[in-house]
Structure formats: structure tokens, C-alpha cells
Image (tube, grey):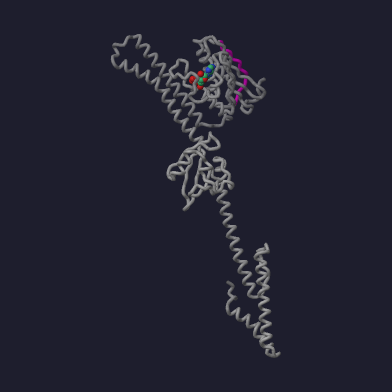
């Protein structure tokens, strides 16, 4: 309070008015009349400023009080100050609320606040997106009526929120949500939900990967172990022909294991080494000529007609990765095409881009397998012991290297007619102008 304003101030003000008035009244001989008139005037004056105060408080939009003299100025200013203070507090609160909302929108999780009885209080945009809620329209409606998943309803009813639960999003089946609920004030709960679809898929992939690798290694190991046990029991009793077969089989199986480990290593190298693909020029024609010689050696058993049509064009990239791509596609064609087939390998310009393709007239690939054929360990012939099947990693390596080089792989195949694997190399990776 203003220090000038006190009882003394009020009494002094009154006396300054009443005493001269009394003196004048006494001098003119109308003491009581003059005093009464003066006091009535004071009353009217006070009523006037009381009216102005009410008018200001109820009808005026401005925060600034009307000007007033004497003690009324203290009343007006006091009210003005109180209003200013509460306005500032309101603004600060609104700022905190806005910041809280902004922060809760920035977190990558859905956040829902509800009461103990389950009534929705507030939710952020992700909450609306993942659970199909509408805020503020759904305020006050129980969550169990809004999210009608039986597991979620029984989780809410149980009231034990020490463990999280996993549910599909009620609006998008393919999205898996991890839901946690935390009490955060006497009567309120905070529900946080996180999209864990990718994590769950990765976890699933990891499990499948470990299972696949173990299976792939188990088969050759079982064969080798079987023979070794036979030799160990009584080496002298083993007929030379069987011994010869055992050694040949063991060499074959250990080569298979070796190939698998090599392929796994090359996948893991590609996973971790993401170097710049523009560092080095790969002389693709020379590389393909070397691969042609390897292919001819590999072809001695099957006697395919091998045709190589190579343009004289180099590209930027990783030589090892590109060799894996070309060699896997050529080897697959030789491997999966019935004897005396025809295999055409082309390296040719297409406009400003380059294209590597391998066509065969083998068995072809049924359409339903094509979208999955580049997945790790995916094979059409599911029999792991089949003489035809490899590990199912070849095309996964091809796809990984192609993605690393920002190239595009297309597979055209007709069952019974053959397959063509095409790798399209973008213009940026082609060295100089393609020789048309
Ligand atoms: P694998 O080690 O089994 O050869 P890949 O990833 O290289 O693994 O190939 C996956 C599957 O795709 C193979 O099991 C095979 O069935 C099929 N495949 C690949 N290339 C050809 C082809 N040129 N013709 C027919 N089928 C093919």
C-alpha cells in the first residue's frame, strides 16, 4: 500500500474539508446547515466515483482506471495493480501451458492424460493419430469406450501398471504400440505409447537370422561329424571306397560352410562399411572379362551357351561389391538353368545410364517369390539339403551392394521360359559419356 495513505491521511483530508466549512457556517450563522450541505456534497462525490469504479470494472474494456482524486485514486490504483498482477500471472501460466503442449507435441510418443475413472483429459497429436482420438471433442469420455481393445480394457481395469503392454494401433493394424501408464498426480494418469513396429520387426529378423545361420551350419557339421565318428570308431575297418566318399563329402560340406561364412562376412562388411562410392573408378569391362573366364570354368559341367556383350564403359563404385553383384547373378544363372541352356550377359548403355543384365532360359521364378527373393536366406527350394539350393544369401548380397550404389534391380521372369536380372546404374556413377 502507498505509504501516504493512512488513517491520519483520511482524517486530515476530512478535517481540511469540514473545518473551513464549519468556520464559514459559523461566520454566516448557518453552522449546521452549511455542515450538512457540505457532508451531502461529499456523499454525492463519493457516490459519483463509486459509480465510475463500477462502470470501469463492468463496462470498460481497458485495464487503465479512470482518473480519480483523493482517496479514490488509491482505490483505483490498487485495483489496477491487482488486475495487472493477475493478468501477468495468467500470461505466465498460459506460457507454461503452451510450452508444455509444445514439448508434449515434440516427443515422439503418444501422450494421453486421463482421470482415475478413465475419463480423457488431454492427448497430444500422436495420441490422436495412433488411437484415433479427437481432442477436445472426446474430453470426459472414458478411455475404455474410446480404445476398445480387450487387452487394453483389462489392463485398465486391473490397475496394475508396473509392466508395459503391446497392442496393435486401433486405427492402423500394421502399427504395433508399446503402452505404459504412469500415475502422475493424485487423481491423474499419463499414458505414453511408442511405435515399436520397426523394433519388433528387427527383433524378429534377428531371431530368424540366428536360426537360419545355425541351421545352415548344422547340416554340413552333422555330415562331417558323422563321417569323423565312423573313422574314429575303427579306421582300419572302413573300406577305401567309403573313405574316399567320406573325404569328398567332407570337403564338399566344409566348402559349403566356408562359402556361407564368406557370404556372411561380406554382408556384414557391407553393413558396416558405408564408404563413398565415388572414390574409385571400377573398370567394369575388365572385371566382367575376368568373371567370364571364371564362368566358363564353372560351366564345364552344364555346357551352357555363354554370351558376353560388353561395352567399353567404366563406373564409379566399390570393386569388391560390384564383383559380388555380377558374379552372384552370373553364377545363379549357370547354377539354376538346366544343362545346355543359353545365358546372355550384357553391359550396355541405356540413354545416359548403364545397364548390367543376365538373361537365362532356365526354370524362371514364380511371381509370388520375386518380391521376397532378395531377403536374407530366402530360397524357392526350401529344402536345405537339396543339391540345387545354396544358402539363400547371394541375392541378399546383390541387393545390398546395389542399394549402396543407388542402383536399381529389376527381375523379369516367366516360369518355364527363363529370367532376366537387370541392374540399372544411374548417370552419376557412369564415368564419362556412355559409348552408345
Ligand atoms: P542361393 O544361394 O540359394 O542361390 P540366392 O539369394 O542367390 O540364393 O537366390 C535365391 C533363390 O532365387 C534361389 O534359391 C533360387 O531358387 C532363385 N534364383 C536365383 N537366381 C535364379 C535364376 N537365374 N533362375 C531361377 N531361380 C533363381
Position of residue 342 relative to residue 151, above or below, is above
> Is residue 291 within the magenta segment?
no
Percent coordinates x, y for residue 429 in the rendering: 61, 27
Q: Which quadrant of the figure contains the C terminus?
A: top right
Position of residue 274 relative to residue 326, above or below, is below
Q: Which quadrant of the figure contains the N terminus?
A: bottom right
Percent coordinates x, y for residue 4 in the rendering: 60, 76
Confirm whether residue 123 shows in the render. Answer: yes
Q: Nearer the viewer, residue 420 or 78?
A: 78
Position of residue 296 relative to residue 50, above or below, is above
Main secondary-structure element of the magenta-colored stretch: strand
Residue 26 relative to residue 182: left or right: right
Residue depicted at 49% across the width and 27% down the height: 267
The total number of labels drawn is 0
Residue depicted at 32% across the width and 15% down the height: 230
Confirm whether residue 290 shows in the render. Answer: no
Residue depicted at 46% across the width and 26% down the height: 264
Instruction: Write down the quadrant of residue 74 in the picture.
Output: bottom right
Tell me the magenta residue range: 305-315
Q: Nearer the viewer, residue 244 or 156?
A: 156
Percent coordinates x, y for residue 94 in the rendering: 58, 55
Percent coordinates x, y for residue 304 in the rendering: 54, 10
Outermost right residue: 28
Q: Nearer the viewer, residue 63 or 427?
A: 63
Amino acid at each position: 500500500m502507498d505509504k501516504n495513505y493512512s488513517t491520519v491521511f483520511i482524517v486530515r483530508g476530512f478535517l481540511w474539508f469540514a473545518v473551513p466549512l464549519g468556520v464559514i457556517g459559523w461566520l454566516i450563522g448557518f453552522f449546521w446547515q452549511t455542515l450538512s450541505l457540505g457532508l451531502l456534497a461529499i456523499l454525492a462525490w463519493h457516490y459519483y466515483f463509486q459509480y465510475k469504479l463500477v462502470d470501469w470494472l463492468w463496462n470498460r474494456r481497458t485495464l487503465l482506471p479512470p482518473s480519480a482524486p483523493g482517496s479514490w485514486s488509491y482505490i483505483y490504483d490498487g485495483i489496477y495493480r491487482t488486475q495487472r498482477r493477475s493478468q501477468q500471472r495468467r500470461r505466465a501460466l498460459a506460457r507454461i501451458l503452451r510450452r508444455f503442449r509444445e514439448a508434449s507435441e515434440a516427443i515422439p510418443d503418444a501422450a494421453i492424460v486421463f482421470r482415475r475413472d478413465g475419463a480423457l483429459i488431454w492427448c497430444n497429436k500422436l495420441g490422436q493419430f495412433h488411437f484415433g482420438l479427437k481432442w477436445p471433442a472426446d474430453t470426459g469420455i472414458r478411455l475404455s469406450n474410446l480404445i476398445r481393445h480387450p487387452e487394453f480394457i483389462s489392463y485398465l481395469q486391473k490397475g496394475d501398471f508396473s509392466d508395459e503392454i503391446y497392442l496393435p494401433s486401433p486405427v492402423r493394424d500394421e502399427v504395433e504400440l508399446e503402452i505404459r501408464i504412469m500415475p502422475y498426480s493424485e487423481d491423474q494418469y499419463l499414458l505414453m505409447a511408442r511405435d515399436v513396429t520397426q523394433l519388433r520387426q528387427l527383433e524378429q529378423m534377428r531371431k530368424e537370422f540366428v536360426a537360419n545361420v545355425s541351421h545352415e551350419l548344422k547340416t554340413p557339421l552333422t555330415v562331417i561329424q558323422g563321417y569323423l565318428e565312423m573313422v574314429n570308431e575303427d579306421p582300419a575297418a572302413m573300406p577305401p571306397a567309403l573313405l574316399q566318399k567320406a573325404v569328398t563329402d567332407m570337403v564338399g560340406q566344409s566348402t559349403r560352410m566356408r562359402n556361407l561364412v564368406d557370404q556372411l562376412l561380406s554382408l556384414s562388411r557391407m553393413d558396416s562399411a558405408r564408404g563413398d562410392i565415388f572414390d574409385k573408378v571400377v573398370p567394369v569391362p575388365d572385371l566382367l572379362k575376368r568373371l567370364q573366364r571364371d564362368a566358363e570354368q564353372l560351366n564345364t559341367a552344364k555346357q551352357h551357351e555363354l554370351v558376353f556383350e560388353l561395352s567399353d564403359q567404366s563406373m564409379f563404385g566399390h570393386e569388391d561389391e560390384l564383383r559380388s553383384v555380377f558374379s552372384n547373378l552370373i553364377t545363379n544363372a549357370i547354377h539354376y538353368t538346366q544343362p545346355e541352356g543359353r545365358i546372355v550377359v550384357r553391359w550396355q548403355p541405356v540413354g545416359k545410364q548403364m545397364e548390367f543384365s543376365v538373361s537365362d532360359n532356365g526354370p524362371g521364378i514364380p511371381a509370388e517369390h520375386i518380391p521376397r527373393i532378395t531377403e536374407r536366406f530366402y530360397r524357392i527350394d526350401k529344402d536345405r539339403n537339396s543339391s540345387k539350393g545354396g544358402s539363400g544369401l547371394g541375392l541378399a548380397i546383390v541387393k545390398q551392394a546395389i542399394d549402396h550404389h543407388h542402383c536399381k534391380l529389376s527381375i523379369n521372369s516367366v516360369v518355364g521360359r527363363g529370367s532376366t536380372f537387370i541392374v540399372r546404374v544411374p548417370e552419376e556413377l557412369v564415368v564419362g559419356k556412355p559409348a552408345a
